[in-house]
């Protein structure tokens, strides 16, 4: 992985963007982006949650695993979310924050 990142840095242009050259460096570009995505996911998880994704080899794998573990589709969970939605109250304060006053 380190070699791939070093190779990617060699291909960075003056604008800071890797110039894609078709199949020649697409894998380098993709692996660099995937490593960044994995880093973003891992740095925002608690150790407890991270245990679920230890064996994942890509950011996509991490995301799919987290989705499968934490997705709730049961009738009960849907009903709870609907109840929470319908319990929201409109207040004058919210109106002033969300909509600028017309003068």
Image (cartoon, grey):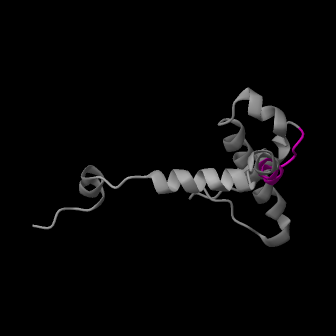
Residue 66 visible in image = yes
Vertical placement of residue 23 versus 72, above or below: below
Question: The C terminus appears in which quarter of the rendering?
Answer: bottom left
From the viewer's side, name the closer residue of 81 and 56.
81
* Residue, far left: 103
Q: Which residues fall within the magenta stretch? A: 55-64
* Left or right: 25 as drawn, with respect to 102: right
Vertical placement of residue 54 versus 58, above or below: above
Q: Is residue 57 magenta-colored?
A: yes
Q: Residue at x 26, y 50 (%)?
A: 93
From the viewer's side, name the closer residue of 90 and 2.
90
From the viewer's side, name the closer residue of 16 and 59.
59
* Residue, far top: 47
| Image position, residue 46 (x, y; %) | 69, 30
* Residue, far right: 55
| Image position, residue 60 (x, y; %) | 79, 54
Examine the image and state in which quarter residue 25 appears.
Answer: bottom right
Q: Residue at x 76, y 46 (%)?
A: 35
Q: Is residue 67 magenta-colored?
A: no
Q: Residue at x 56, y 59 (%)?
A: 15
């Amino acid at each position: 992985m380190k070699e791939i990142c070093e190779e990617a840095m060699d291909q960075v242009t003056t604008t800071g963007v890797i110039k894609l050259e078709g199949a020649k460096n697409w894998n380098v570009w993709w692996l660099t982006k995937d490593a960044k995505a994995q880093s973003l996911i891992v740095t925002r998880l608690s150790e407890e949650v991270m245990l679920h994704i230890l064996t994942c080899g890509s950011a996509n794998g991490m995301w799919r695993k987290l989705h499968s573990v934490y997705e709730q589709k049961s009738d009960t969970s849907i009903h709870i979310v609907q109840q929470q939605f319908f319990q929201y109250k409109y207040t004058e304060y919210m109106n002033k924050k969300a909509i600028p006053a017309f003068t």
